[in-house]
Amino acid sequence: MPEHKQKRVQVPLPSGNFGMLERIWEQLRLAWLLYGDSRVRLWLKALPVLAIAYVISPLDLLPALLLRVLGVLDDIAIFGLAIIVFNSLSPEDAVVEHLRQLRFGGKYRVYKDDEGVVIDVKAEPSDAQTASEESSESEQLAGSKRERSARR
């Protein structure tokens, strides 16, 4: 009997130009949110701390004083690799939740409970809905003013 592999959940990219620097910034922000998440194991949270310690440490694989550019690049590479590994080894549900929050502004939250997957939506009315609600409110106010004047 073949084993069924579960597909990883994909979070769509927001519309517009989403360049390399924005992706790097997003991964750093994701790591920050995951670091504060209780679903991420403590041993995994040690990875970014060790990477930061390596960057600020005077000990280097390639000394910055001797090899200037290469010395700095190895620090950046080690830190970037640590963040990528940290983000990829974190629990998938936490990663998906925080990515959706980062990309779509926290308009909804997806989580699992005893009964299954729950999508908590914070609905925001569109401009057309807002305009129609405002016109219906003004009609209600005008109708109530007419009723009051008819009673007098």
Image: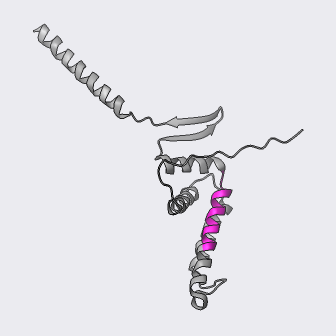
Q: Residue 47, located in which quarter of the rendered image?
A: bottom right
**For the N terminus, which image quadrant?**
top right
Judge left or right: residue 53 versus residue 7: left
- Above or below, comparing residue 33 to residue 121 in the picture: below
Q: Majority secondary structure of the magenta segment?
A: helix
Give coordinates of residue 130: x percent, y percent.
33, 31
Which residue is nearer to you in this view: 47 or 74? 74
Which residue is nearer to you in this view: 20 or 7? 20
Which residue is located at x 68 percent, y 57 percent?
Answer: 89
Which range of residues does the magenta coloring cover?
77-91
- The furthest residue to the top: 151
Give coordinates of residue 121: x percent, y percent.
49, 36
In the rendered image, residue 78 lying in the magenta stretch gets the answer yes
- How has the structure been colored for display? one colour
**For the C terminus, which image quadrant?**
top left
- The furthest residue to the bottom: 66
**Count of all numbered marks drawn on residues in the image:** 0
In the rendered image, residue 85 lying in the magenta stretch gets the answer yes
- The furthest residue to the right: 1
Which residue is located at x 45 percent, y 37 percent?
Answer: 122
Q: Residue 140, located in which quarter of the rendered image?
A: top left
Which residue is nearer to you in this view: 45 or 6? 6
Which residue is located at x 61 percent, y 64 percent?
Answer: 83
Give coordinates of residue 39: x percent, y percent.
63, 51
- The furthest residue to the front: 17
